[in-house]
Image (cartoon, grey):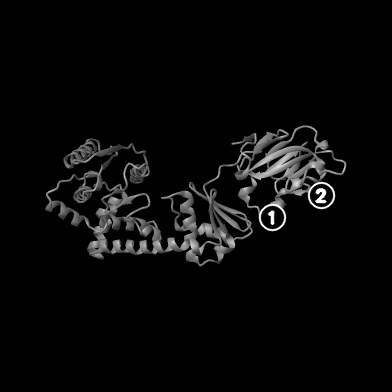
Amino acid sequence: MSGGADSMALLHLLYATRLDLTVLHVNYGLRGEESEADQEFVSQTAVDFGLPYRIHRVELDAGNLEQEARRARYAWFTSLVSDGIVEKVATGHTKDDQAETVVSRWLRGAGTAGLAAILPETREGIVRPLLNYSRADIRNYLKRHNLTWREDSSNNWLRFERNRIRHTLLPELERNWNPKIVAALAQTADWARAEEEYWQAELPRLTQNWLRFGNLGATFQVAGLNAAPLAVARRAVHWAVRTVAGKGKSPDFAHVERVLHLARRPGKLGSFRTAEWEAVSSLGTLRVSQPAPKRAVYREILCVPGACVLPDGSAELRLELNPLQSVYNNGEQLVDWSLIRGSLELRNWLPGDRFQQAGHFTASKLKHYFQETGIPSWERSGWPVITHDNSILWARGQGVCSAYVPTANTATVLRILEVPYSVADETTNRKVWR
């Protein structure tokens, strides 16, 4: 609680329900002695009610103080819930706060997800019991019960957007446009929230054939995304970005349209990037993910026999020496060991790499293989190859180079086996690259 009217009313109402309460207060230190006085008032109020209390002091960085304060406040609240210290956190948001938030979101061009504004309850355990009551209702309640509160002078600082909406824009709309503007805006939020609840339930069904979420992000089949009604496509992109970038990082309209524009160019490589997420379109698929750092070239001399986990963590590469007649080719790749002079090196694919697949008479670029088999661009940079004497001996998906294929005269073979890491033998002596 801040010590203001709304939080004092909330405390009084919850106390009457005989809930097990803890008073929470965040001190940003923005108003010097006034901030300290607010903290003392909240602490004393908790003592007067016979309740425990917790104080959280925050130093805000320069920038958007409103956003930074909100981020710090809710980070603390959600940590208290996730750590099991409290079951839920109740805040004193009112119908007026809801109206201000709707206006703020609307001015930014929000869709219904944004216009739903302040939710009565969140998945993180934040509840707003006063959301259907106006500030006037709250003050009347306090006066009837002879309760005191403190006024926060920062609520009058017009450098804050919310205060300009509260003291300038909404009064103007109320006087000259709609005397019940606060109620009308709160109804807009209710309407938008019901719309969002419907879409959240329906989107998984509507996108099940062309949208997948995984550890690396969200992947669209472009054909499905393009065939979907525009309303579904926009919401699917919005959902993917919010999931990847995290709560509070919703894309704006222009961002969603940029992603859809990428999808409308099938077969062409394209990308769009922000600070929190990126979208890349390649070979009929489009992936939304967190911005990937530029992958460094990895090079490592291999031990034979031996094993290692590939740098992307997807599989274990096993190298074994065996007599040719004792080997059964059940997916492993075989190399004539007598042709190996010197070391073998594991590295990632590089642009321009050429490879002559067994059974082929000429070498071709691995890039052509990627294109023919539909390997999207984001999977290529870490594609593993094994080199010998400056040429590629083995490449994932391509097998062994034709020059190294065993013959009837081969006595010993090098067996290369790529095993998905999830089922790799945990007892194998392997090396992991990071």
Image mark count: 2
Precedes in sequence: disc 2 or disc 1: 2
Quarter-wise, where is residue 195 in the image?
bottom left
Indicate whether 28 appears above or below 133.
above
Q: In this view, does 258 lie above or below 309?
A: below
Tell me: 94 left or right of 215.
left
Give the spatial CA distance, label 2 vs label 1.
19 Å
Numbered badge on residue 334: none
The N terminus lies in quadrant: top left
User: Is residue 383 at all visible to an observer of this figure?
Assistant: no
Q: Viewer-proximal residue, 173 or 53? A: 53
Q: Position of residue 424 (x, y in %)?
A: 63, 42
* 350 or 397, nearer to the observer: 397
On the image, the x and y values in percent for residue 360 come to 81, 51
Residue farthest to the right, as pictured: 409
Q: Which residue is drawn at 15% across and 46% down?
A: 148
Whether residue 47 can be seen here: yes
Farthest front residue? Answer: 326
Q: Which kind of residue does numbered mark 2 sit on?
A: Thr
Query: Residue 218, how many percent across, how many down?
Result: 53, 53
Around disc 1, counting alpha carbons within 10 Å, would you say few (fewer than 14), some (14 to 19), or many (20 or more)?
A: few
Camera-nearest label, 2 or 1:
1
Q: Are marks 2 and 1 in contact (CB under 8 Å)?
A: no
Q: Which amino acid lies under the numbered mark 1 shown in the image of this protein? A: Thr
The residue indicated by pointer 1 is 373
Name the residue carrying label 2.
362
The quarter of the picture where the C terminus appears is top right
SS at mark 2 in the image? loop
